[in-house]
Image: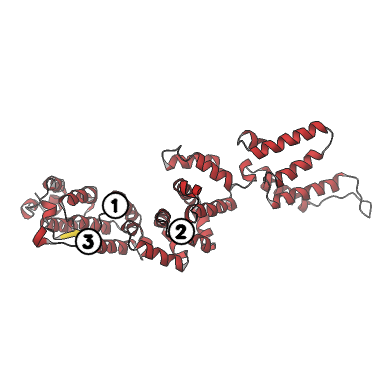
Amino acid sequence: MNDLKDIHNDDKAKKILEDLEADKEENPVSPDWENNLIEKAFKEAKLLENDVYTHITTLKRYRNLSGHPVLNSLEILYRPNKEIVQSLMINMLEGLLTKHPLFTKNVFVPFMVEIERIKNDFSTEERLEIYLESKFLVHFNKELVEYIFKHLWKSVFKSNGEKETKNRNVNYKVLLIIYRRYEEILFEFIKKETAHFSDFLDENSHILDKFVDFLSKYPNVYPFLKEHTRQILTNRIKDKKQLTVKSYFLTDSIKTHLKRLDDEFHTTGEYYYYNQPYEHYHILEKDNIEFLFNICQKYDALPEFYDLMISHYYHSGHYNTADYTFGYCISPYFKGFSKEQLELLFKEANSNPQCYAGRYAKGNHKKLLETAKSLLGDDVEEKYKNLF
């Protein structure tokens, strides 16, 4: 109680302690303040759970029974057995005495209040995690992890209140931190509570973005969602290209997903009128390219990732698009291309004016020359004259 008052500025704890101090001053020899402390902590401050309150009152009865000259019918003073004493000690330690002061009350409320208070104080997620670890996570047990995560999930994905909306970004960061740290525990918890974790406000685009992002980070959760949720996700994602990029959990493998992206994002153009043999339905953003690279690296699918990057470049339908896709799809990765991939890149780009006729095209392609000669031979410039 004193810790809650002095360290955490808890107003209810402060009021209870002031009342108890007044009682002790009024009746300095009366033990009533002890009873009042337990009752007020349970009923007013909500510091004690029902089970902890019951354990405390039970312990008090056993203490009174053992500490006073109350004899049974055989005139023997009551002595609790070893098992009862051990059980009472464990209940007191686990339920109250070894708990962090914040966790002896409704922990989710002070937890969320603190998250809101410090949401702008940390420039990176890593620093936020260090803070949470020091103040909260180090004190969490399995039950508390599940409790916090369940309520945090509701706040992030199932609530549209003013506070939830205002704090959704930081709350989602905290949810990811907790899941990453306790993934084994929480994966089993999600499997056990699929109904709760299958619900989300699918018509809210911000919530949908975060729900897809979570599944893209932890795709093994997706099969355990309810069937109606999986169907809603498929319907909501299909017309949103940004979400489509991340939704590899909808396919049987990342390699299948990459092929799907190639088919959905690329088409033929109007070569005769506009010198556009190819065109894009969607242009990958830098963040999504990096996301795909990291996922493909994780699942041993880099050759297929390179195929998509090459295709995305040579499907450029404008000079500016070609410069952009070269910078983000080709330049960072070309040293990992195979001979066959580099050959395909040069063949297709050499026949697409949007790739070879732009202001920066020749300078871009010369960056590939050393690698190209080592794989394709010294006559590469002669063979693909448009590029060099």
Residue under label 3, please give it.
266
Frontmost residue, 294 versus 195? 195
Residue 321 at x, y = what percent? 19, 51
- Dot 1 or dot 3: first in sequence order is 3
Residue under label 1, please give it.
289
**Are dots 2 and 3 in contact, CB under 8 Å?**
no
Left or right: 172, with 45 as reference point = left
**Front label number (2 vs 3):** 2
Label 3, residues with CA under 10 Å away: few <14, some 14-19, many ≥20: many
Label 1 and label 2: CA atoms lie apart by 28 Å
Residue under label 2, please give it.
201
- The circle on residue 72 is none
Mark 2: secondary structure: loop
Three-letter amino acid code at disc 1? Ile
**Are dots 1 and 3 in contact, CB under 8 Å?**
no
**Front label number (1 vs 3):** 3
Three-letter amino acid code at disc 3? His
- The relative height of residue 279 versus residue 57 in the rendered view (above or below) is below
Residue 383 at x, y = what percent? 7, 55
Residue 18 at x, y = what percent? 72, 34
Residue 378 at x, y = what percent? 8, 51
Three-letter amino acid code at disc 2? Leu
Question: Residue at the location (10% across, 51% down)?
Answer: 357
- Dot 1 or dot 2: first in sequence order is 2
Question: Residue at the location (31% across, 64% down)?
Answer: 256
